[in-house]
Each structure stands twice: as C-alpha cells, then as structure tokens.
Amino acid sequence: MKVTVRFFASVKEQLGRELEEIEVPAGISTVGGLRAHLRARGGRWAEVLAETRRVTAAVNQDMVKPGAAIKPGDEVAFFPPVTGG
Amino acid sequence: MSNNPSIGAVASFVGLVREVAMTLEHYPGMTENSIRKIAEEARSRWQVIDCTVIHRYGDLRPNDQIVLVAVASAHRGEAFAACEFIMDYLKTRAPFWKKEHAAEGSRWVEAKSSDDDAAERWRLRQGATKP
C-alpha cells in the first residue's frame, strides 16, 4: 500500500526530508511498523527514528500511539514532542 | 462574546515571547483540527458559552503575542478552568514547534515534562470539575 509520510521540525531538519510517498511492504500495518521500516534505511534514519528518541506520530492529522493502524492513502506524520502555546 | 446576557465571566490568557526571537513551525490542517478538538473538549467539560483561540506561527520577536485563549461562561470558575485547560492541552496536543534564535545559534526548544504533567492532571480530574 501507498501512504504519504510527512516530517516536521527537528525530525524534518535532521532527515533532510519533508514529504515522501512510500510504498509500504506487505506485513506492515501500524505506525510503529512504518517507523521501524524507515529506521531500517540506516544512517540518519536509524538515528532520528531510534526507539530511544521521543518521536510523535499522527495518522490523518490525529496524534496516535505506535500500535495505530495505517491503511492505503493515509497521511502519516512523524515529529518531535510539540512545544507551542 | 458581547450582547449575551447569560455571560457573567470572561477569562483570557495571552502567551508572549520571552527574551529570544523564535520561529514557530506548525502542521497546517492538523493545527486547526487540534485546536477545534481542544475547544470542543472544553465545551464538553464546562459550561462554555463562547471561546476563541488564536495561535500565531512564523517569525516572532520578544514581547510578541504567541497565543490568545478567551473563554466566556456564566461564572468565573468555569471560565478560569476552561481557559487553563485549553492552554494546557494546546501545549501538549497542538502541532507547533518553537525554534529559538539566540546570538550563539538557533535551536529547537525541548518539550517540558512539566507541560505533560499540567495536561495530565486534567485527565485525572475528568468529571471532578464538571458541574
């Protein structure tokens, strides 16, 4: 399935990427699974999306937990903890 | 908020930029949705007659206003509580990120655990403060 992945703030800067269409391999059905898939690219990806780093995910613009399901056409976003207000 | 005789209290909060210039990044679309949801949550918990939230993004200088929350209610207790709740939730749920620009360079502001704690206490108090 294909999903759109967006990155924000320090995650975007450190990955050098803002937006990407990703063909998700069969067997990956959650946000956490997608994060692990991206981490497996190695290099900056392994570092920025490391399990020890606090990275928040959103699916279709709603903050979710790593176990949240993803489906074709979803907009998934990864970003650091928010600091507005 | 004017011309409504049932309004007895308006509580407002304005957040300002302290000392260092910054750029506020946000997630267009999700930002608006999350603010709408936070306001709806406040309306479901307290008797909010009206409420307004304005949050800026982009480049901001010291003393600039970042955020305004204003809540109108029949009584002050509800207005104060809903206003504080909205601010605490904005801090932890609305997709904004601050990047400070100091003389020695720019850096992303780290999220504070005290903000998480402030938002969390509303979860614990859910129901308790409801009229």
Image: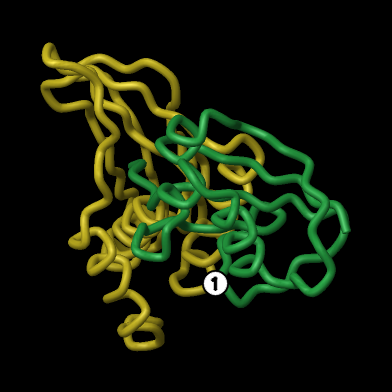
Chain colours: A green, B yellow
Query: Residue at left 25%, top 45%?
Result: B110
Side of B54 relative to B80 (left or right): right
The spot of residue B15 in percent (x, y) is 26, 36
Q: In this orientation, which residue lies closer to the viewer: A17 or B20?
A: A17
Query: Residue at left 68%, top 53%?
Result: A76
Q: Amino acid at mark 1?
A: Lys
Image quadrant containing the N terminus of chain A: bottom right
The spot of residue A3 in percent (x, y) is 80, 51
Quadrant location of residue A40? bottom right
Number of numbered tags placed on the structure image: 1
Mark 1 neighbour density, 10 Å: few (under 14) some (14–19) many (20 or more)? some
Side of A66 relative to A21 (left or right): left
Query: Helix, strand or loop at disc 1?
Result: loop
Single out the residue that lies furthest toward the bottom.
B128
The spot of residue B127 in percent (x, y) is 40, 87
Tell me the residue that label 1 is attached to: A65
A48 above or below B28?
below
Query: Residue at left 24%, top 58%?
Result: B115
Query: Residue at left 54%, top 55%?
Result: A39
B113 above or below A79?
below
The spot of residue B69 in percent (x, y) is 38, 43
Image quadrant containing the C terminus of chain A: top left
Q: In this orientation, which residue lies closer to the viewer: B119 or B42?
A: B119
Side of A1 relative to A67 (left or right): right
